[in-house]
Image: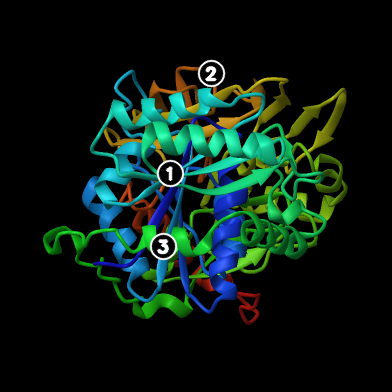
Amino acid sequence: MSTPRVLLAGLGGGGGKTLLSVGLVVAWRRRGLSVAPFKKGPDFIDAAWLTKAAGVPCRSLDLYLMSRDVVVRSFTSECAASDVAVVEGNRGLFDGVDARGTYSTAELAKLLRAPVLLVLDCTKSSRTAAAAVLGCQRLDEDVNLCGVILNQVGGARHEGVLRQAVEETCGIPVVGAVPHLGRHPFPERHLGLVPPDEHARVDEAVEEAGSTVERYVDLAAVWQLAQTAPALPEAIAEPARKAPVGDGAADIRIGVFRDAAFQFYYPDNLEALRREGARLVEVSPLADSALPDLDALYAGGGFPETMALALARNAPFREAVRRSVEGGLPVYAECGGAVYLGEELHVDGGVYPMSGAMPAAYGFGARPQGHGYTTLEAVRPNPFYVVGEVLRGHEFHYTFLQAVTAGNTSFAFRVERGHGFDGRQDGLCWKNALAMYTHVHAAGVEGWAASVVAAARRHRRDTIGCHSTPRSGPEV
């Protein structure tokens, strides 16, 4: 696999990687290139912006969540029909889970043999920028650090000093210099960037990023650097084989929460469900008044805290979810979806009723309650995982469990790494519903999709005589 590729990295979070990655994708698409977008790490929001820019799903590549071979296969499979690949790193280039930078962006760059562009926030600095680049070069010389993009440049004189310092000291080119922008197209809030589903001018923001890159980045130089990427070894570059959808595709229907409040899904997870024979039906807790005829429900993460009033006002849908869970519908809920299954959410002094499907009340804190990678072990029976199974995932939430309001609930998982519900447990069980703060990636938890579809099939079999009307609803 010898697709041209480039990875954009930084010295930390908030340095401009997303703006430049999105802009680079847009600029190359304007020139007629098909671009395969990727995001290093478990982030959903940056990946959503890259998806908007590329017009195809952005894939997450994470060495903690999935094996090295799976990462490479995912990368090469998506690159097969593309002219170029753009990978956005996360945090700082060498930041990982420990002092050695395990699972870092640098480790991913080496695995993919990707040339690295270092994005530098140059606010109130000059020659020190060269010292930062030099340190990155020396810390791991196996990382192909091939160019620098200066960000937050103060003016022509500032840019000249920075360029000279970096190029003379480090021997690599400065391929772009972006000034302070009067209006940033991607505003931030408590979980990072505002996601596209809540942005007032999505297309304008994406196009603005592209125009910024076209104006301030040397696209010809970046293209030349992308073309220097060596071929990946054939033994590990074989694309992943997609399993065919089973014959039961027309029968098994899994609902997927999808609107401005619930938007965090890895495309790999949705595709894995389809490969196991499921048809996915979008439902909106904000807009719909009822659930369609379903065999299971996948309630993904999102921002119920920012949409609490609107969610609370849709009483018919809340009641439909409550009745369905009470009737035994299998529900797999992650983070925001887990909060929605609860009875109420306390935010900024207000109390907002949620679906009431599970006996739990949630609050919203000023700081993250859980943030980072998780490792869980299943210790109690639950609808989707076998006891003894160990899985890796990710969590990032400001909400927290205030109280469990019924005594016959249980937690399915012991937390070995991370926070979950209380630092010790994750996976609240009620009926056939499982509510978790941990997000899992189907490429890293290979049996996840099969278990969700199996639960749906069991429910379908048990209720086969109850369907009296044709099954309908929009598919994802």
Asked if residue 366 is positioned above or below residue 153 in the image, the reply reads above
Would residue 145 appear left or right of 119 to someone viewing this image? left
Q: Where in the figure is residue 127, as x and y percent of width and height?
A: 53, 25
Q: Earlier in the sequence, mark 2 or mark 3?
A: 3
Which mark lies nearer to you, 2 or 3?
A: 3
Q: Quadrant of residue 105?
A: top left
Q: Amino acid at mark 3?
A: Ala
Q: CA distance from mark 2 to mark 3?
A: 40 Å
Would residue 270 appear left or right of 403 to someone viewing this image? left
Q: Where in the figure is residue 197, as x and y percent of width and height?
A: 72, 56
Q: Where in the figure is residue 60, as x and y percent of width and height?
A: 43, 51
Q: Amino acid at mark 2?
A: Asp
Asked if residue 438 is positioned above or below residue 4 in the image, the reply reads above
**Where residue 422 is drawn, which disc sits there?**
2
State the count of labels: 3
Residue located 77% across and 55% down the image: 317
Q: Where in the figure is residue 48, as x and y percent of width and height?
A: 59, 55
Element marked by disc 1: loop
Task: Kindly identify which residue carries mark 3.
Answer: 85
Mark 3 in CB contact with mark 1 (< 8 angstroms):
no
- For the residue pair 292 and 431, the one nearer the viewer reads as 292
Task: Kindly identify which residue carries mark 1.
Answer: 440
